């Protein structure tokens, strides 16, 4: 509930006692941003609790200084020197009282923990750093050094890597406290770095009540004081979308996550609700496991692609509030190839392609679909519609689902035949779409099609080693054309993003890169 009773003070300004409640649909798996790999995880900790060396401007995809005030890049493009912001304080909590300000030691700890499995803290608390490795930073970074008595950090790369700065602004690169980590090692409980988190961000963690609430308080010592407009931020874990809407209407929540698209029209008519809207930096798609026959045959993939009625999916699943996807990157992404076209939907031609490939009577496959996913309001309905479309060309499919963690684990292991999945770009570079979803380097990661094409790989490798955006764009355009010819996955939809908020919320901006951000957000 909204409370406005008395004033509290911070070092820079008086902040009214304002509590914002966010009705959120997922329980956290911890609060260590370095380990996180999903938008709900990023929302619960990377934006409220932490900062990175560089960040994206709130509500935009442009980079801005953060814990690094400025940086230099060497002429050969392989050395980045970051000059660190002074006066930044880590959170003071009941479990940690910092004795020093943020410095290079914290940057080194954060990245060496992800890079080096033999460092003491990593050995004491061995966990996976999926994003760091999927982004290729384990191979890209050669050396990290502290400079200028701990007020600067130098990253030396093995090769030119054009998306490097953007990757450092992604949530997984959030900076943790080396001093706190040393305390946890001494106490013999290093896992508390995830469950009793400490950062430099606008909100301080207070408690998590399992499957119920996450409580934060405004950081009175935040280095950007104007961004702290709330004294308390509460995540009310509410899995049911209909209940989230009811709580918003009753002002029990002032912001809600993942509204049902069928509720948007009614919310837009409610005089007490604002519905923010933005084009999405996202894509839902259907990945064909090319290591499972007959999906290794491009004729089969084209036939399956050609049979899908994408317009019906947009109309029925997305309530018309999405764009048919054609390219393997979303339209918001620079280098998006707007000239690409889908083959016309043609069931007879699809049957002919299957016959040519040696399957005149079709075949049977497994179609994996999650229970829920941020880029698709109803993946089970989508899967059922695709199942029906394929049946018309003689292809039988069994819909398979698992609990989310098991689903992703098995998908990365390549157990599926076809996988309905989606992605939201956590940094605005074509590399996140083309390298991570389709390259040979990601075949054991989130390249769920396990497709391999040397010409494609050569182009995206040349692109990341090219600094000039116009030159990079040409490489990516050629790569997208190869993708379209080979069809390792079928892009389904680019969905619009809708964010209902109560009319008394101020300063809210939709984040095109996924996580919901509450810095700068206040209440009237």
Image (cartoon, rainbow, N blue to C red):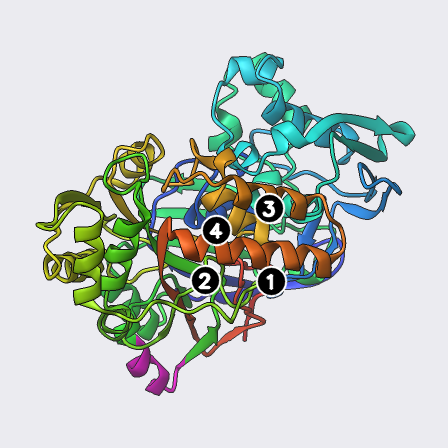
Of labels 4 and 3, earlier in sequence is 4
**Relative to 370, residue 230 above or below:** below
Specify the label residue 460 is tagged with: 3
Q: Which residues are magenta?
A: 264-273
Pointers 4 and 3 in contact (CB under 8 A)?
Answer: no
Q: Please indicate, yes or no, whether residue 514 appears anywhere in the rendered image.
A: no
Q: Position of residue 438 (x, y in %)?
A: 46, 44
Specify the label residue 335 is tagged with: 1
User: Where is residue 167, by image quadrant?
Assistant: top right
Q: Position of residue 239 (x, y in %)?
A: 27, 54
Q: CA distance from mark 2 to mark 3?
A: 15 Å
Q: Nearer the viewer, mark 4 or mark 3?
A: 3
Of labels 2 and 1, earlier in sequence is 2
Q: CA distance from mark 4 to mark 1?
A: 28 Å
Q: Which residue is mark 4?
A: 43
User: Where is residue 105, by image quadrant?
Assistant: top right
Of labels 4 and 1, earlier in sequence is 4
Q: Kindly give the residue lying farthest to the right in the view shown.
A: 148
Q: Which residue is mark 2?
A: 327
- Horizontal arrangement in the rendering, residue 501 relative to residue 83 (left or right): left
Q: Magenta includes 272?
A: yes
Of labels 2 and 4, earlier in sequence is 4
């Amino acid at each position: 509930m909204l409370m406005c009773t008395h004033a509290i003070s911070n070092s820079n300004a008086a902040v009214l006692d304002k509590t914002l409640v966010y009705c959120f649909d997922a329980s956290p798996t911890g609060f260590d941003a370095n380990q996180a790999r999903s938008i709900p995880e990023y929302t619960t900790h990377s934006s409220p609790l932490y900062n990175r060396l560089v960040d994206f401007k709130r509500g935009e995809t442009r980079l801005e200084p953060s814990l690094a005030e400025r940086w230099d890049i060497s002429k050969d493009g392989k050395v980045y020197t970051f000059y660190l912001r002074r006066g930044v304080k880590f959170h003071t909590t009941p479990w940690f009282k910092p004795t020093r300000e943020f410095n290079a030691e914290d940057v080194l700890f954060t990245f060496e923990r992800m890079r080096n499995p033999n460092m003491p803290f990593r050995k004491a608390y061995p966990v996976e750093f999926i994003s760091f490795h999927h982004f290729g930073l384990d191979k890209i970074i050669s050396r990290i050094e502290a400079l200028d008595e701990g007020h600067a950090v130098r990253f030396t790369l093995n090769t030119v890597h054009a998306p490097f700065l953007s990757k450092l602004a992604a949530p997984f690169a959030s900076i943790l406290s080396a001093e706190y980590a040393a305390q946890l090692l001494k106490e013999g409980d290093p896992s508390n770095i995830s469950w009793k988190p400490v950062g430099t961000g606008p909100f301080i963690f207070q408690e998590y009540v399992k499957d119920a609430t996450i409580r934060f308080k405004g950081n009175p010592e935040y280095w950007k004081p104007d961004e702290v407009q709330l004294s308390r931020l509460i995540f009310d874990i509410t899995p049911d979308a209909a209940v989230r809407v009811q709580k918003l209407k009753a002002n029990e929540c002032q912001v809600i996550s993942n509204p049902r698209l069928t509720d948007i029209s009614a919310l837009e008519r409610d005089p007490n609700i604002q519905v923010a809207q933005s084009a999405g930096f996202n894509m839902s798609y259907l990945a064909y496991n090319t290591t499972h026959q007959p999906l290794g045959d491009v004729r089969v993939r084209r036939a399956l692609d050609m049979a899908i009625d994408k317009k019906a999916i947009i109309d029925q699943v997305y309530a018309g509030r999405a764009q048919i996807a054609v390219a393997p990157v979303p339209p918001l992404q620079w280098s998006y190839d707007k000239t690409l076209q889908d083959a016309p939907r043609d069931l007879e031609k699809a049957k002919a392609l299957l016959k040519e490939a040696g399957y005149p009577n079709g075949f049977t496959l497994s179609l994996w679909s999650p229970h829920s996913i941020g880029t698709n309001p109803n993946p089970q309905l989508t899967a059922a519609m695709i199942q029906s479309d394929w049946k018309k060309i003689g292809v039988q499919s069994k819909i398979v689902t698992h609990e989310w963690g098991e689903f992703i684990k098995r998908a990365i292991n390549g157990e599926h035949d076809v996988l309905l999945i989606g992605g939201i770009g956590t940094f605005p570079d074509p590399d996140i779409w083309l390298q991570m979803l389709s390259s040979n380097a990601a075949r054991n990661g989130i390249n769920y099609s396990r497709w391999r094409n040397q010409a494609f790989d050569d182009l995206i490798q040349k692109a990341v080693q090219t600094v000039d955006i116009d030159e990079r764009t040409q490489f990516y355009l050629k790569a997208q054309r190869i993708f379209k010819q080979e069809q390792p996955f079928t892009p389904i939809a680019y969905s619009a993003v809708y964010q209902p908020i109560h009319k008394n919320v101020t300063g809210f901006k939709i984040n095109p890169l996924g996580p919901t951000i509450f810095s700068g957000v206040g209440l009237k």
